[in-house]
Amino acid sequence: MSDELWSRVEPVLPVRPAGRTGPKPLPDRQVLQGILFVLYTGIGWEDLPQELGFGSGMTCWRRLRDWQEAGVFDRLHEVLLAELNAAAAIDWSRACVDASHVRAKRGAGHGAEPGRPSQDRLEAPCDLRRRRHPPRGAAHRR
């Protein structure tokens, strides 16, 4: 992991309380590298090679769980988006809303048949819908 990336990640990680008993925990940077290695390669947590120095797969999994519960990745996402936006590096005209990022309102599906989408769902603005298909009556080029 580059120092540049680590400088963005480190400030959003929770601080461990002082005075903990037990063995000294592995540094967060090493554990994050182990997490990224598992996620990138697709190997199982228990298959993380010890000789890489990232700790055990269980250590990496626990830290990932704790960081997820602490909202680390949500905060990191916000920080990176703000940085990219300030640099005018985001083309917002290509942005879309995805159900995995937007919580559905409770009871939004009233009146819809089971298994069918509700008619009051969000739709893309007209200009975005039009881009998906050629204008009616447009000649097809071969």
Image (cartoon, rainbow, N blue to C red):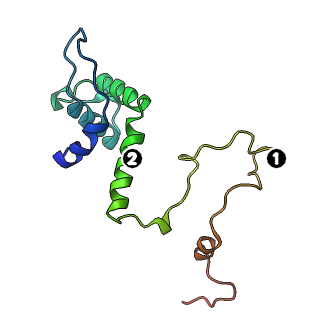
Q: Give the residue drawn at x 29%, y 23%.
A: 59
Quadrant of the snapshot with the N terminus: top left
Q: Alpha carbon of mark 2 to alpha carbon of mark 1: how far?
A: 36 Å
Q: Position of residue 40 (x, y in %)?
A: 32, 43
Q: Quadrant of residue 137?
A: bottom right
Secondary structure of residue under mark 1 = loop
- For this orientation, the residue located farthest to the top is 21
Quadrant of the snapshot with the C terminus: bottom right
Q: Give the residue drawn at x 75%, y 55%.
A: 120
Secondary structure of residue under mark 2 = helix
Q: Position of residue 29 (x, y in %)?
A: 21, 34
Q: Position of residue 83 (x, y in %)?
A: 33, 55
Please determine whether, in this image, residue 14 is positioned above or below residue 135. Answer: above
Q: Give the residue drawn at x 39%, y 64%.
A: 90
Q: What residue is shown with label 2?
A: 77
Q: What residue is shown with label 1?
A: 113
Q: Give the residue drawn at x 24%, y 30%.
A: 28
Residue 43 in the figure: left or right of residue 137: left
Q: Please, what is the three-letter code of the amino acid marked with disc 1?
A: Glu
Q: Position of residue 30 (x, y in %)?
A: 20, 32
| Residue situated in front as seen by the camera: 82 or 118 | 82
Q: Quadrant of residue 132?
A: bottom right
- For this orientation, the residue located farthest to the front is 86
| Residue situated in front as seen by the camera: 77 or 19 | 19
| Residue situated in front as seen by the camera: 5 or 112 | 5
Please determine whether, in this image, residue 72 is positioned above or below residue 82. Answer: above
Please determine whether, in this image, residue 85 is positioned above or below residue 17. Answer: below
> Quick one: label 1, few (<14), some, or many (20+) residues within 10 Å?
few
Q: Are the residues tagged 2 and 1 within 8 Å (C-beta)? A: no
